Image: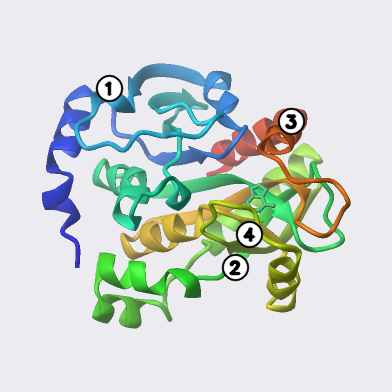
Amino acid sequence: MINMNAKYRDTYEALADLMPFEPEICIILGSGLGDFAEKVETVKSIPTSSLPQYPRSTVQGHQGYLHFSKYQNKNLLIVQGRIHFYEGYTLSQCVLPVYLSSKLNCVNIILTNAAGGVNSNFNPGDLMLATSFNGSNIKKELTDLIGLVNLSQRNDFLDFPSKEINRIIINAALEEKIKLQEGVYWLTKGPSYETPAEVRMIRSFGGDAVGMSTVHEAIYASTLGMKASSISCITNFAAGLSDQKLSHTEVMETAERVKSDFERLVKKTIELL
Ligand code: HPA
């Protein structure tokens, strides 16, 4: 088991010294969705490079900042610059923003991401609320992180995604008249996109969207007693479902196209939380 308190004490202490207030809602921004940070009032932005032990984000579209922000009188911690498995980081590094938000007493966490559409009813530009996740391909890493006993005892009663926040996100979409798909978010670790055969397998296993983040963050947040939900921006048809070759550029371009709906949905969710 990894002792996160010991491993990241310096990171937490440096952040606690700099923070202007205790955040109540944490929002992790996915690929191409980083602009959201500029759409709410920023009180203080902390470059993650100034925090000891904080991993560097190497992905285009993932600047490394922790923003302490406000919207509708709610105190937010916005994480711009996610840490991924495919950058070579370990699970304990990938969940560091979740760990820090929990240490700062955040109770709600909204995980956003770019994902490929596996369900043939999904189109690039759709937004999808996660109703469930796969966790099987990270069992070993999770066990290393939180311990076998903890994992086996907790898996059956963890509430993730949070039913309460999911209900709020559905209401936010209704109020804002935004079409919201619902489905299973399927984690693959990358670094490459899936093969068409893998996408067929994911579909047959019940996956609706595929991406390289979020699941471990949601599971870990739940083990810390946080309420976690996930909103995906479907940026492309998953491999094999269209003739177009997959690229990070397509992911970024679609995210750019839907960012105003995404922004309205997340803002309304914050307001209703
Ligand atoms: N697969 C995995 N991750 C992704 C995809 C995809 O098709 N699109 C955006 N992130």
Identified by mark 4, the residue type is Ala
* Left or right of 146 on screen, residue 169: right
Question: Mark 3 falls on what kind of element?
Answer: helix
Identified by mark 3, the residue type is Glu
Q: Contact, CB < 8 Å: mark 4 with mark 2?
A: yes
Q: Position of residue 83 (x, y in %)?
A: 42, 43
Residue drawn at x 45%, y 58% as measured from the top left: 218
> Label 3 to label 4, Cα distance in Å?
22 Å
Gap between marks 4 and 2 measured at Cα: 6 Å
* First of labels 1, 2 by sequence position: 1
Element class at badge 4? strand
Distance of label 3 from label 2 (alpha carbons): 27 Å
Whether ligand 1 has any atom under 8 Å from the Cβ at mark 3 is answered as: no
Give the numbered dot on residue 130. Answer: 4
Q: Which residue is mark 2?
A: 132
- Badge 1: few (under 14), some or many (20 or more) residues near its Cα, within 10 Å? some
Q: Is residue 255 above or below residue 216?
A: above
Q: Earlier in the sequence, mark 1 or mark 3?
A: 1
Choose mark 3 or mark 2, whichever is in front.
Answer: 3
Q: Which mark is residue 20?
A: 1
CA gap, disc 1 and disc 2: 35 Å
Which is in the foreground here, disc 1 or disc 4?
4
Using the image, tell me which numbered label, if any, was put on residue 253. Answer: 3
Q: Mark 4 and mark 1 in contact (Cβ < 8 Å)?
A: no
Q: Residue 211's spot in the image, x, y percent? A: 61, 54
Q: Left or right of 253: which side holds 156?
A: left
Q: Where does residue 143 sit, x and y in percent of width and height?
A: 30, 73
Q: Is residue 194 left or right of residue 119?
A: left
